[in-house]
Image (cartoon, rainbow, N blue to C red):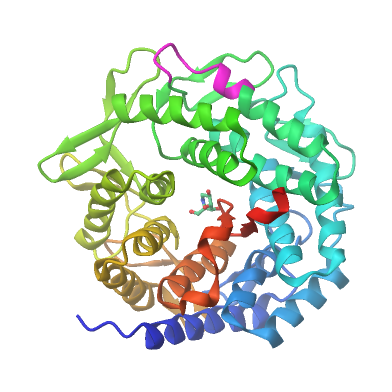
Amino acid sequence: MEINKKELAEKVKAEFMHAWNGYKKYAFGHDELRPLSKTHYDWYDDSLCITPIDAFDTMVLMGLTKDKNEAKQLIFEELSFDKNIYVSVFEITIRILGGLISAYLLDGNKKFLKLSEDIANRLLPAFNSKTGMPFRFVNFKTGAVRGKINNPAEIGTLLVEFGSLSKLTGNPVYYDRAKKALVELYNRRSKIGLVGTTINIETGKWINKESSIGNKIDSYYEYLLKSYLLFKDMDCKKMWETSIKSVNKYLADSKNNGYWYRQVDMDTGKKISTKFEALAAVFPSIFALSGDLTRAKKLQDSCFKMWTTFDIEPEQIDYKTMKIKLAIYRLRPENIESAYYLYHYTKDEKYLKMGKIYLESIIKYCKTEEGYAELKSVITKEKRDRMSSFFLAETLKYLYLLFAPKNTLNFDKIIFNTEAHPIQKNICK
Ligand code: DMJ
């Protein structure tokens, strides 16, 4: 397979413009494009401009100056958080707070920082629980909260954004609240060092004790490592090292067909199932970032197999039988993200080839007249009328960076939040 990096980078950029133009034409000012019905979709009663905020730094990195300026104007003119809506603390933090902070760092306009502070202040009441772990939802206007049954990913994926805001504003409250949540969660790990899937944040009691590296847990581990690397926070280093040791001891599963991670009971380590999820494909990138390239490479080979066995990646498979458990493809980035990290660390052309295959299948099966659509099924390839903002924030950004010239972004000087928003390490001097 021939790899022409320059051509591939231009191709990704053109596909980004295809998706962005669809958004501009049919959904401008709204949260997302509906790519089949050519209308818009808002997460709540009113728009929070999720796609333009999530996509902003991708446009900066791709050098799309005109479009990034249009997005900026829209954000400054239209965006207001003074709305009587209950929002997801996790989703809004990683997409909007993370997007605004990275926009501020790349663009320099202080309005981005003001908006970041405004939104973070409105999210803060979520941490007013008996344990300090956040409720899942908070009302932007009233500060009222909902959702005391939360999960490790939504509790533990806040510190990169809140901590960065503290560094940029000099106000420690954001760092302190998000870190306390992380520590409280970690302190409730089982005797063998694992966390479960859901927990009551008022009582601190686990509700579902299934442990995995997938849905509802994945980015908790990611942020233990990234918070250590970004803030040089030695508590996070210790929490990361202890946790990942248990994960590798009890969840890792070497089979004839590859290296995988299973589901186990958090107290006993007893196997529950052999499911592997598209979300778990972020782990090769996490292992690579932590310095464990051996594990990263082995797991990425399995993730690649998961993609290529079905021509495009299903949401869940049973790796023992290699049968699909959940057939949707949500335009997710994780498999691509890991190929990008591995290429960065190894310079092995194999990861460029992976990226090319990922790109080609997304174009083949998900492209619509005016955007990109999720798949209801990777078997029938029937499309679904959604184009999540992370397709522009992450999937196309990681594909672009994989092929783009080296000076596009200095990888060693940044940490990506879980939504692919780069945060410069030097804010933590
Ligand atoms: C994104 O919002 C983030 O990457 C999150 O950590 C997981 N889900 C999506 C992408 O799949």
Please give left or right for residue 36 compared with residue 292 in the image: right
Magenta stretch in the rendered image:
184-193
Image position of 70 with respect to 34: above or below = below
Percent position of residue 377, x then y:
34, 59
Percent position of residue 263, x then y:
33, 29
> Which one is nearer the viewer's eye here, 368 or 305?
305
Residue at 32% x, 73% y: name it: 361
Please give left or right for residue 311 compared with residue 140 in the image: left
Image label count? 0
Residue at 19% x, 59% y: name it: 309
Residue farthest along the front direction in this orientation: 429
Please give left or right for residue 118 compared with residue 69 in the image: right
Percent position of residue 298, x then y:
23, 48
> Which one is nearer the viewer's eye here, 85 or 260?
260
Image position of 191 with respect to 33: above or below = above
Is residue 213 one of those drawn in magenta? no
Quadrant housing residue 173: top right
Residue 98 appears in the rendering:
yes
Percent position of residue 182, x then y:
62, 29
Please give left or right for residue 233 compared with residue 274 in the image: right
- Name the main secondary structure of what is drawn in magenta: loop
Quadrant housing residue 415: bottom right
Residue 377 appears in the rendering:
no
Q: Quadrant of the N terminus?
A: bottom left
> Which one is nearer the viewer's eye here, 231 or 298?
231
Residue at 35% x, 61% y: name it: 339
Residue at 68% x, 55% y: name it: 426
